[in-house]
Image (cartoon, grey):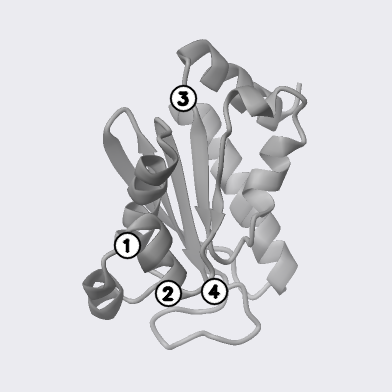
Amino acid sequence: MTIEEQVVDKLKSRGEHIAFAESCTGGMCCARLVGVSSASSVLDMSFVTYANDAKIKLIGVDENTIIKYGVVSEQVAAQMAEGVSRTADAQVGVGVTGIAGPTGDTPDKPVGMVCFGFYTDGEVKTFTKYFGNIGRNNVRRKSCDFVYETLNSIL
């Protein structure tokens, strides 16, 4: 059984739905879930919120949080996770925001830095991973791997 199938099974057994708010992964996490034949029983909608305005308008990220902490931050990832859960009326929300590269880095936020938010059981857990400058699509893949490993452990 794949990790995506395990996550779907856990969501089904809990009677819960999931929604993703993805930036640097561009829908890849949601696409992996949709690869499971019974995904429709746990997924109604998800969002690719690549632009800051999309994060603000569609899932309720506070513009001031983006200004204060930067769009690649655990604070924004947390608001993405909680916001997408609320917007999609889902019990589980996942937010992913990062710098896949090869550009967009700063001295404090290098290529390969990705922040994650997971909203479950009314609480948000956040993480930051540094995958390194391993190539844009490798950062995206490793980010999705981390999402599913985390979901599998917290559900």
* Residue ID for mark 2: 52
| Circle 4 crowding by C-alpha within 10 Å: few under 14, some 14–19, many from 20 | many
Of mark 4 and mark 2, the one earlier in the sequence is: 2
1 or 2: tag closer to the N-terminus? 2
Q: Secondary structure at mark 2?
A: helix
Residues at circles 4 and 1 in contact by the CB criterion of under 8 Å: no
Tell me residue 151's x, y (percent): 51, 34
For disc 4, the marked residue is 99
User: Mark 4 or 1 closer to N-term?
Assistant: 1
Q: Earlier in the sequence, mark 3 or mark 1?
A: 1
Q: Position of residue 116 (x, y in %)?
A: 44, 54
The answer for how far apart the CA atoms under marks 1 and 2 are is 9 Å
Measure the C-alpha gap from mark 3 to mark 2.
29 Å
In the rendered view, does 91 fall on the left or right side of 45? left
- What amino acid is at disc 2? Asn
Q: Amino acid at mark 4?
A: Ile
Rendered position, 3 above or below 1: below
Locate the N terminus and report the quarter of the image it occupies.
top right
Labels 3 & 4 near each other (Cβ < 8 A): no
Position of 81 with respect to 99 (left or right) is left
Q: Which disc is residue 61 wearing?
A: 1
Task: Name the secondary structure under disc 3.
Answer: loop
- The residue pinned by badge 3 equals 155
- Amino acid residing under circle 1: Val
Closer mark to the observer between disc 4 and disc 1:
1
